[in-house]
Amino acid sequence: MLSRFQSFLKEEFKGLPNTDEVTDFKDELLGNLMDKAEELKAKDLSEDEIFQQCVQSIDGYKETLKELKGKPALVRSAKKAANSLLYALMYFTLVIGAYLAVSFVTEEWRLTWLIIVEGAFLFTVGLLGSLSVKAFAKKKYLHSRALAVPISAILVTGVFLAVSMLMDLWKISWIAYLFLPILIIIVDLIIGAFSRPNKIIVPESIALIMLLSVMSYVVLGILGILSWHPYWLIILGGALISLGILAFYLKKKL
């Protein structure tokens, strides 16, 4: 009965835009139909009779469909844009309020500007993240994964500025950018894990392991935590692990 109701609603809603308002109304009607069907099952009626009575029970829905069809796309888009703008204004009002409050209390104006910058970074990451989620939901996996690059770049830049300003580590904080490719690959692997098929998961995994081993060796050497020799073996270890993954993959394929 569920599939029959879904087919019925799909036909009735044909031509309507795929908006939240339309989707919510369709889901509401489907729920009402299923509830009514469960109620009628106890009356020993045929499936066709149950279907007809259920459809009659939601009488009046066509008036709502006419209203939904009558709304111009421009009006719907303008309303959505207005809501988004309102939320953005509220967010930045809170960020600026926090900046002024912290600045007047601490009198650290040379540092508190970070609140606005980091707030803008977080807003941008949230916006790009929502676009990535929407693209993924529509099975536009390439678009979704492409957004991993700017998201990762903004996150790393935010960390770089915060660490550099608050801890005065300008001389070494640039190291954060060495890990940018690693972060991009990790985010892409996470997104790719839920998309089918993901044909580059093996080469991406190998690239991630090699980058991790090389960057770990370089960073630990620059910071003086480990000596350059013999800890170059870290890279060799990464290469061996990568070869093992590749060999296992090829064996499974052949």
Image: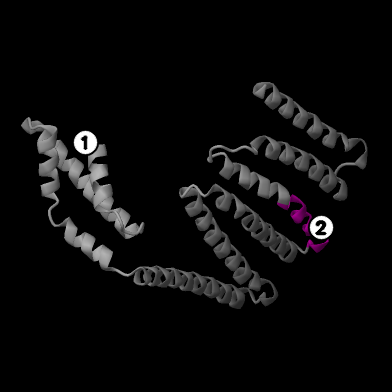
Q: Amino acid at mark 2?
A: Ile
Marks 1 and 2, how far apart at CA: 64 Å
Q: What secondary structure is found at the residue carrying circle 2?
A: helix
Q: Is residue 169 left or right of residue 43?
A: right
Residue 106 vs 251, above or below: the answer is below
**Horizontal and vertical percent position of residue 94:** 50, 71
Position of the C terminus, as image quadrant, is top right
Q: Which mark is residue 1?
A: 1
Residue at the spot of label 2:
172
Instruction: Find the magenta span and give its range.
Output: 169-180
Residue 59 on the magenta segment: no
Q: Nearer the viewer, residue 98 or 93?
A: 93
Query: Which secondary structure is most common in the magenta stretch?
Result: helix
Q: Residue at x 23, y 39 (%)?
A: 4
The kind of residue tagged 1 is Met
Question: For the residue carrying disc 1, how many other residues have a C-alpha within 10 Å: few (<14), some (14-19), or many (20+)?
Answer: few
Of the numbered discs 1 and 2, the one sitting upstream in the chain is: 1
**SS label for mark 1:** loop
Q: Residue at x 62, y 47 (%)?
A: 187
Q: Residue at x 47, y 54 (%)?
A: 134
Magenta stretch: includes residue 171: yes
x and y, in percent, of residue 145 in the image: 59, 50
On screen, 34 above or below 154? above
Q: Is residue 208 above or below residue 23?
A: above
Residue at x 80%, y 29% (from the top left corner): 240
Residue 124 position, x and y percent, is 57, 64
